[in-house]
Image (tube, rainbow, N blue to C red):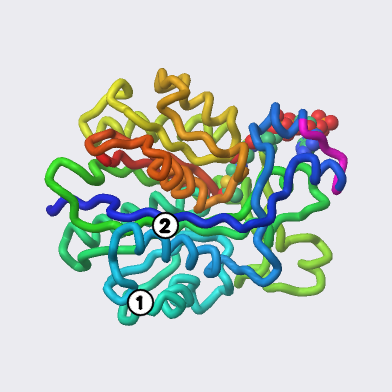
Amino acid sequence: LRPVGVIGTGKYVPERILTNQDMEKMMDTNDEWIVSRTGIRERHIAAAEQATSDLAYEAAKAAAASAGIKHEDIELIIVATVTPDSAFPSTACILQDKLGAKGAAAFDLSAACSGFVYGLATATSLIQTGMYNNALVIGADCLSRITDYTDRNTSVLFGDGAGAVILGEVPEGRGFKSFDLGAEGAGGPLLNLQAGGSRLPASEETVANKQHYIYMNGREVFKFAVRVMGTATIDVLAKAGLGKEDVDLFIPHQANIRIIQSAMQRLDLPEEKVVINVDKYANTSAASIPLALVEAAEEGRMKPGDKVLMVGFGGGLTWGASVLVW
Ligand code: ACO
């Protein structure tokens, strides 16, 4: 199998920033509670005319430019999202048209906050086997569109953004070394969007019942997250023949600083080896890990040969982890 890795990166967050202080004016909450319980200070919110494909487009353009690849040469587009522009066509197809990536295969992938890592695994396999030579993998979400801004339990946690990578063949010894994907479907009801699908189509009742907004059992999701962040990181390192001491940079899903800290303790990782930007962006679901990866790349935090460990968890319930030699 040929080695496959990241050959280009790009990101985009909407201009508008909603701070904790702004949220204090909207509901009964306060900066101290939000920072101490979550680590979040502000989040970016899409403009009224922006949909997920618009965020994805900006990130994709930047990734293609950084890889030096023409849009028409992109062969495969995977958009990981839980907030597609519409149920269909897929956001990936809308994006393919915007980019002018004529002929590229395009599909969306639904694995919530683990979606980007699921997308990396899918694209890597398809390139390794020779079916495609490159792929654009994007995590993009507009969680503000499914957030109830009268519910302090959830609304402070989420933001909008997009992160993109171009995958392609890399020199021997580099690239993705292992993946660990998993799901616990029984936990689905702990974190979901109840209406708008074939089970419960949109109706006056679903709107009145607020069933088009994210529902989350925060405490149970927290427990799941702490557990799988531990097990998935150990499993994915073992699959790559590595131990926790080998990790040069840890890129966890940015949902809550306390969940990240528990994983750091488990892995004995000092802060300088961990990418944390939950304070600036909050939880952007599928965009969270790629935003952190792209920012780390832009800040020069990875040098060739560094071992990068990514791990995410989210609705499904799902988790996804990967070891990448940069
Ligand atoms: N401001 C002030 N008080 C608040 C707020 C707020 N924004 N939100 C909740 N509270 C109150 C609650 O009402 C509760 O009050 P009560 O005890 O009087 O009922 C109190 O704070 C404590 O609430 P807890 O739920 O016990 O707080 P906890 O410490 O568990 O933190 C949190 C809550 C931050 C949601 C935490 O459980 C968490 O991070 N869970 C995981 C979330 C997560 O990772 N989600 C991933 C989503 S991924 C995806 O797919 C979108």
Q: Is residue 184 visible?
A: no
* Residue type at the position of mark 1: Ala
Q: Is residue 213 left or right of residue 272?
A: right
Tell me which residue sits at (40%, 31%) in the image.
231
Tell me which residue sits at (29%, 51%) in the image.
6
The residue beneath circle 2 is 164
**Numbered badge on residue 75:** none
Question: Label 2: how many residues lie within 10 Å, few (<14), some (14-19) or many (20+)?
Answer: many
Image location of residue 194, percent across then percent down: 67, 60
Q: Is label 1 within 8 A of ligand 1 (CB to nearest ligand atom)?
A: no
* Residue type at the position of mark 2: Ala
The boundaries of the magenta stretch are: 26-31
Secondary structure of the residue carrying numbered label 1: loop
Question: Label 1: how many residues lie within 10 Å, few (<14), some (14-19) or many (20+)?
Answer: many
Image location of residue 161, percent across then percent down: 56, 55
Residue 76 belongs to the span the image colors magenta: no
Q: Is residue 251 left or right of residue 39?
A: left
Tell me which residue sits at (25%, 64%) in the image.
134
The residue beneath circle 1 is 101
Q: Nearer the viewer, residue 190 or 245?
A: 245
235, above or below 176, in the image: above
322, above or below 15, in the image: above
